[in-house]
Image (cartoon, rainbow, N blue to C red):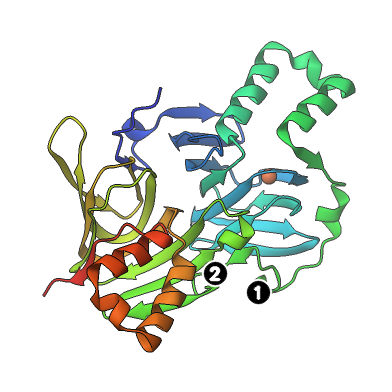
């Protein structure tokens, strides 16, 4: 059973990993295992050696979101090819064919999986390779193995002949400037990088760019995990613990913070930060849009604390205060 109070993972610190598997052409470091019936919030790093190729294939289930933390990769997606690099995000819904060639030594694919259980898949593959290598030659077995994984192999020649196009022609590759929707205010900017509409409702992924002093309080207990990936700056977290008082720590760039259900918490930006909300249960896109309309049309709703709380809960938003400290 995984410890729910592993709040902080520093991605490059071996002591923070739950598992480390050297697969030869790549290394996998697991940070958080999938949770719940929909297998949400699995996060890991796969670090590739230069020249490693992942053959063209597609999945019948699961959502893969890759943050390129270092290096570059030639992506073939839906029959077109482009190079994605550090800072880009690649999001792949089911039935989106994809193949990769990792171009730089030590390219880091920082992964968020939903409804796929990748770590179990890797365990299964290594189990078969180590103990029953002959089964890899058995087409009937391999057919069963692939079906269980929901993985469908495409003809590899597609990857060879795919035309090179500008990245903007492959919408699954999201450059830093990309946003489905952008909202901003005094000291904050939010960019929708992955929509709920492309994850069958599982979640949405937001990039937040926050000035020092921005403070967000979540004092309304709720039954969901929260999952943040910090890419710039420093952020202080204060989390109410079940059996102790409070855990207080500062998360730096290159770390992931997971907050367990019902734990009231506070986020304070110590040094201008960029963070990704990778566990967003809030219907934030809908909420921001509706709040802007309500502010314009019936501002009295937002003056009344009872009505305001009701409205926020409608969107599963448990934020109780959002302000910028002087
Ligand atoms: Fe895949």
Q: In the figure, 216 relative to 34: above or below?
A: below
Whole-percent x and y of residue 57? 77, 46
Q: Are marks 1 and 2 in contact (CB under 8 Å)?
A: yes
Question: Tag 1, which secondary structure?
Answer: helix
Whether ligand 1 has any atom under 8 Å from the Cβ at mark 1 is answered as no
Residue hosting label 2: 175
Residue hosting label 1: 168
Whole-percent x and y of residue 286? 49, 69
Quadrant of the snapshot with the C terminus: bottom left
Q: Quarter of the picture for ligand 1?
A: top right
Question: Tag 2, which secondary structure?
Answer: loop
Whole-percent x and y of residue 50? 60, 47
Relative side of 159 to 257, left or right: right
Determine the residue positioned at 33% across, 32% down: 4
Q: In the figure, 125 relative to 89: above or below?
A: above
Determine the residue positioned at 45% across, 76% down: 290
Q: Earlier in the sequence, mark 1 or mark 2?
A: 1
265 and 176: which is toward the camera: 265
Relative side of 15 to 315, left or right: left
Whole-percent x and y of residue 49? 58, 42
Determine the residue positioned at 50% across, 61% down: 86
Spatial distance from mark 1 to mark 2, Cα to Cα? 8 Å
Q: Residue furthest bottom?
A: 296
106 and 2: which is toward the camera: 2
């Amino acid at each position: 059973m995984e410890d729910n109070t592993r709040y902080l993972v520093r991605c490059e610190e071996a002591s923070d990993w739950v598992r480390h598997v050297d697969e030869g052409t790549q290394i996998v470091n697991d940070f958080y295992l999938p949770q719940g019936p929909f297998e949400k919030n699995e996060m890991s790093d796969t670090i590739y050696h230069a020249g490693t190729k992942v053959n063209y294939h597609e999945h019948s289930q699961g959502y893969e979101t890759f943050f390129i933390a270092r290096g570059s990769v030639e992506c073939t997606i839906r029959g077109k090819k482009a190079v994605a690099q550090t800072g880009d995000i690649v999001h792949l819904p089911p039935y989106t064919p994809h193949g990769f060639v990792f171009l730089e030594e030590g390219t880091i694919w920082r992964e968020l999986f939903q409804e796929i259980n990748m770590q179990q898949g890797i365990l299964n593959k290594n189990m078969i390779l180590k103990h029953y290598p002959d089964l890899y030659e058995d087409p009937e077995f391999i057919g069963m193995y692939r079906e269980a994984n929901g993985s469908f192999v495409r003809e590899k020649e597609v990857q060879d002949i795919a035309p090179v196009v500008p990245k903007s022609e492959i919408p699954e590759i999201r450059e830093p400037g990309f946003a489905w929707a952008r909202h901003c205010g005094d000291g904050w900017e939010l960019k929708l990088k992955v929509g709920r509409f492309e994850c069958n409702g599982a979640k949405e992924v937001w990039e937040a760019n926050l000035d020092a002093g921005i403070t967000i309080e979540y004092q309304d207990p709720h039954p969901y995990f929260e999952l943040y990936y910090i890419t710039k700056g420093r952020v202080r977290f204060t989390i109410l613990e079940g059996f102790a008082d409070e855990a207080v720590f500062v998360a730096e760039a290159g770390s992931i913070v997971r907050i367990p259900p019902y734990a009231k918490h506070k986020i304070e930006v110590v040094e201008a930060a960029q963070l990704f909300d990778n566990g967003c249960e809030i219907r934030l896109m809908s909420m921001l849009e509706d709040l802007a309309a309500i502010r314009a049309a019936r501002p009295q709703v937002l003056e009344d604390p009872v009505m305001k709380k009701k409205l926020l809960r409608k969107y599963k938003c448990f934020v109780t205060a959002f302000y910028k400290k002087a």
